[in-house]
Amino acid sequence: MTVRHLDRPGPIRAVLFDFHSTLVDQGDPRAWLDLAWAHAGRSGTAAEGLGQQRFDDLARWLNHVWEHVTEVDPRNERDLSPTRHRQVYDALMERVPGGTEDLEQALYEVMLEVWMPYDDAVPTLRALKARGLRTALVSNVGADIRPVLERAGLGGLFDAIILSYEVGSVKPAAAIFEKALAALDVAPANALMVGDNWTDDSGAARLGVRTLLLPRTSGVTHGLELVLRLVGP
């Protein structure tokens, strides 16, 4: 299929979804810390071991950990390979208040275990499938997130899964969106992109894909019912 750019918008026949902070929340940083604490083989709770103030400071930092990443990885190279992803994570964690090497390693090893789907993620994807629309996951990620998809009940709901480290292209570059559109056999004018990051996900808009941005929320739902309103019955 040849992707056509900047066509006049037509009926939406396919929806592209970002993953992190769009379909899944990265979870409670305190739960992440406690899980990593146990994974590292430490006794008690993280708050007891670190002290309440250090625990709170670390949890606050972890809650926005990937928002700090442009300082050490401005070109999103972490999303092109698992090795680079780990290297960038290690560089980030050197800035962590009160962290230790074994805890930082444990945090990385259990990171994906605390990612949880928003309550409206599965219903929205099922509703799109019922309406005959095709869907693709388009994610900047340097690790295999398929286990998260399966655990979250999302695994069988996509017609295509496009991960940056597998296709060698990182949003907002056009290539990663073009691969998703080609996989779904849909023109930009008949697609909708749903994401949370205006810098990354706006790359779809430059191709003529209508783009819905839903910034990260802390609640159990993410406003994904707006997708169904946009695509129509």
Image (cartoon, helix red, strand yellow):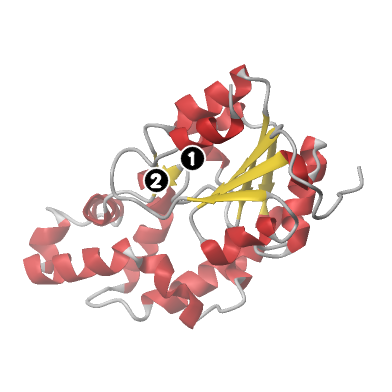
| Amino acid on which disc 1 is placed | Val
Q: Residues within 10 Å of mark 1 (few under 14, many from 20)?
A: some
Q: Is residue 73 left or right of residue 105?
A: right
| Amino acid on which disc 2 is placed | Trp
| Residue at the extreme right | 2
Do the numbered discs 1 and 2 sit on residues whose CB atoms are within 8 Å?
yes
Residue 168 is at least partly visible in this image: no
> x and y percent of residue 84 in the render?
60, 70
Question: 45 or 112: which is nearer to us?
Answer: 112
Q: Quadrant of residue 118?
A: top left
Read off the residue under disc 1: 148
Q: Quadrant of residue 65?
A: bottom left
Q: Quadrant of residue 171?
A: bottom right
Read off the residue under disc 2: 115
Residue at 81%, 49% in the rendered image: 7
> x and y percent of residue 178 in the render?
79, 52
Task: Measure the C-alpha gap from mark 1 to mark 2.
Answer: 7 Å
> x and y percent of residue 26 in the render?
38, 51
Residue at 34%, 72% in the rendered image: 101
